[in-house]
Image (cartoon, rainbow, N blue to C red):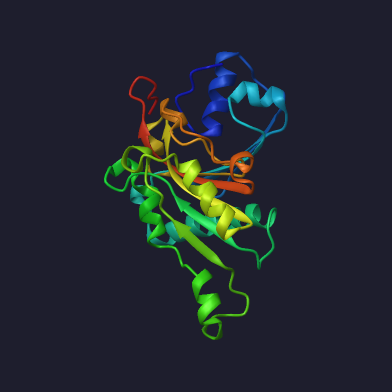
Amino acid sequence: MLDFRTDLADERKDLYKKANNIENEIDGIEANEEQINNNIKVTRVKIMNEQGERALGKVKGNYVTIDMKNMKYMGEEEIQKASEILCEELKKMIDEYVSKEQEILVVGLGNIYVTPDALGPKVINEIDITRHLLKYVPQYLDKNTRPVSAISPGVLGTTGIETAEILKGIVDNVKPKLVIVIDSLASRSMERISSTIQLADTGIVPGAGVDNARKELTVNTLGVTVIAIGIPTVVDIFSCNA
């Protein structure tokens, strides 16, 4: 298998095709691109079987990448457009696995004290948490409010506990129907740092993109479907192609 040094499925696809001189689609993989406007593009990669898994080194499932070209020059209107696209894609993915009333656990992976790894914990602070409110003051919430809980479990180096072990205990007790994990990713391109978002319904192997893989966070380890949301914050200098 290629040494991809990236978490992004669409980058892995392009690298595999280039390395094997493939002009058409890779066996076991479906891919398409949707150009929303001059600055926003959505790429969907679906790995359908074991052959596709071996090619890209990722498990079967759906990977959606939202690219925002020249994001630092985007105006408020275009940033709002990108936000709406992310919401639409995430909603479609969530609706595949749970109903509107079922509980979701949101997990912010990473180390808040290390800038490129702080994405997950910082996002958790912005999540609207409703689980406790529905239990204690439901009269103040819309009747269609979904129960949402959240946790930032830290990292092995500061807790001494594998994240998968922490989350397994939480899932077994809280019993959410779906887990959403948010994490920093690795890319091969400087242009994609903080300008790309990847959604995947396959869970995640934290640290895999930089050869520091921890225990996977998937339906196999947690017992519920895991949707991963990631943004590249690091790039390997030896593979950088910006």
Looking at the figure, which quarter contains the C terminus?
top left
**Rendering quarter of residue 238:** top left
Residue drawn at x 40%, y 31% as measured from the top left: 189
How far across and down, in percent of the image, does residue 122 sit? 35, 54
Residue drawn at x 65%, y 64% as measured from the top left: 102
How far across and down, in percent of the image, does residue 65 sit? 54, 42
Residue drawn at x 57%, y 20% as measured from the top left: 16
As drawn, 157 above or below 178:
above
As drawn, 3 above or below 123:
above
Looking at the figure, which quarter contains the N terminus?
top right
As drawn, 29 above or below 79:
above
How far across and down, in percent of the image, does residue 190 sit? 36, 33
Residue drawn at x 70%, y 53% as measured from the top left: 96
Residue toward you, 209 or 165: 165
Q: Is 213 positioned to the left or the right of 10 in the image?
A: left
Q: Residue furthest bottom?
A: 139
Residue toward you, 146 or 22: 146
Please tell me how many numbered marks the rendered image carries.
0
One can see residue 92 in this view = yes
One can see residue 78 in this view = no
How far across and down, in percent of the image, does residue 26 sit? 68, 23
Q: Is 16 positioned to the left or the right of 187 in the image?
A: right
Residue toward you, 57 or 32: 57
